Image (tube, rainbow, N blue to C red):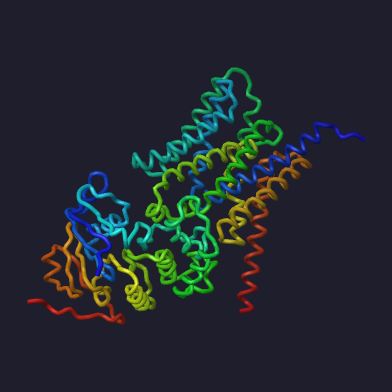
Amino acid sequence: MRKLIELISVTAGYDSKVVLEDVSLAVYENDFIGIIGPNGGGKTTLLKVILGMVKPIKGEVIYNHELLRRNDIGYLPQISSVDISFPLTVKDVILSGLMMHKGVYARMNREDRKKVEKIIEEMGLKGFEKSTLAELSGGQMQRVFLGRALIGNPRLLLLDEPDNFVDTSFENEFYVKLHELNSRMAILMASHDVGTISSHVKSYACVNRHLHYHPSPELTEEQLSAYNCPIQIVAHGPIPHTVLKKHD
Amino acid sequence: MEVPVFQYDFILKGILGCLFASITAGIAGTYIVSRRMVFLSGGITHASFGGIGIGYFAGVNPVAGAAVFGILSAMGIEYLSVKQKIREDSAIGIIWALGMAVGIIFIYLTPGYTPNLISYLFGSILTVTNTDLIALGILSAVLILYFSVFYRTILYISFDENYARTYSDYVDFFKYLTTSLMALTIVLNIRMAGVILVLSLLTIPPNIAMLFTKKYSSVMKLGVVCGFAGTSGGYLFSWFTGIPAGAATIFVLVILWIILKLITILISKSKNRKN
């Protein structure tokens, strides 16, 4: 498997406040890494470093340019800050995922409109093209933003707490979708809810100022505490989940 | 019978004034309403009164003074709230009152009577000069051009700034530039609707448009049309009754909004009944 991106001893933060210290991580094609850790532990910052939005204070971020340019990264941010009553249609929200390929003079052509139709179909949003976000359910809104992250056909997909406002009826469907996408792209998913993601990811990165990579999808409470990763393991009823076996 | 020349001039001025006001207010208003910047715009409007006062005192065009004050206050509010971490609504409140105070002080210090002052407070098409009209016409052209060339960029920055930062390094540049154009729009429309009423010229048309569409570009276009209906209706109303045009415009717009709102409520109710 080929390497897409590598972080080498990266220290990063905001102003003078260090959030991540000496973090190293390599992401390969078809990886599906769960990024876990407490709130404020640096999960979002890690994603922003990979996106190039936060420049490292120390260390290096190396992109494999043959496989991954900056605009080959799809991003699903935490969307609590978006104003859902903004007069913008679902179609236009999804189209904004193409802006990274377009620049400031962006025009949407016929090809782009075809792309957006395909994504709308794929995300099960047909009939909602002209709706605003305020008219959608939490799960539908989630799919709009996932569609925005996917329309540019990324090689690497970054998801920041996607389970935050997914309604449970869509949750399973959402992870099935991610599983399917994983055959085409690497996925990094930040979450503070290990139970929900444990049956879907291939490996873990535990982020709490430092990063500990755990190359198997099994994780025990002992390991979490050893990594100084104070996380609750929560399991939900209707979602398929694995019971983690303890290591010796 | 010969119609006096000044009357043609007056009608032409009225039509152009209404047209330019509705274009600028429709475009800027959609941006301001969508981004929930109405209170900020109120701050800019009132702060620019300081520029009007200084303009009177210094003997320069008060609109020019207001333009400088408007843009500076927009930047000042941004600076106070982002860099000094003063809460935005407090920053607006401070700048709002400071501008009014400066205006009042300088008008008080200006020797003699200031006859046009009332037109700045309530707006009047009668006192709109050719220079004002030309400025408003140029601004209309600039706004149309700006929003057609950079439509997607402006739209997506105002919808989701954080996401825009993932693909663009120009987010702050466009934010400041657009805010400055909004400040200019407000200031140049003060002549039409006055410091006290100009805010509704910006907020009512897009809100009428949003009764019918939620597509940003359509809200802008329909907002311009509604604005023109309001300003020209108000202008005619004031022509026949002698009521100040600014107040008449706002009155017409609000009535229009109420009627259309009621109609849309009735339509959606009858649809529900059928279902």
Q: In this view, does A24 lie above or below B178?
A: below
On the picture, is A9 further left or further right than A125? left
Q: In which quarter of the image is residue B244?
A: top right
Could you say which is closer to the camera, residue A24 or residue B12?
A24
On the picture, is A112 further left or further right than B20? left
On the picture, is A229 further left or further right than B175? left
Q: In which quarter of the image is residue A40?
A: bottom left
Q: Residue at x 55, y 57 (%)?
A: B216
Q: Quadrant of the N terminus of chain A?
A: bottom left
Q: Which residue is drawn at 65% across and 73% down?
A: B270
The outermost residue toward the front is A66
Could you say which is closer to the camera, residue A237 or residue B181?
B181
Residue A72: image x %, image y %? 36, 61
Q: How many labels does the image show?
A: 0
Could you say which is closer to the camera, residue A165 or residue A110?
A110
Residue A54: image x %, image y %? 29, 51
On the picture, is B106 further left or further right than A241? right
Residue A26: image x %, image y %? 22, 62
Q: In which quarter of the image is the C terminus of chain A?
A: bottom left
Q: Quadrant of residue A207?
A: bottom left
Q: Is residue A31 above or below residue B95?
A: below
The outermost residue toward the left is A248
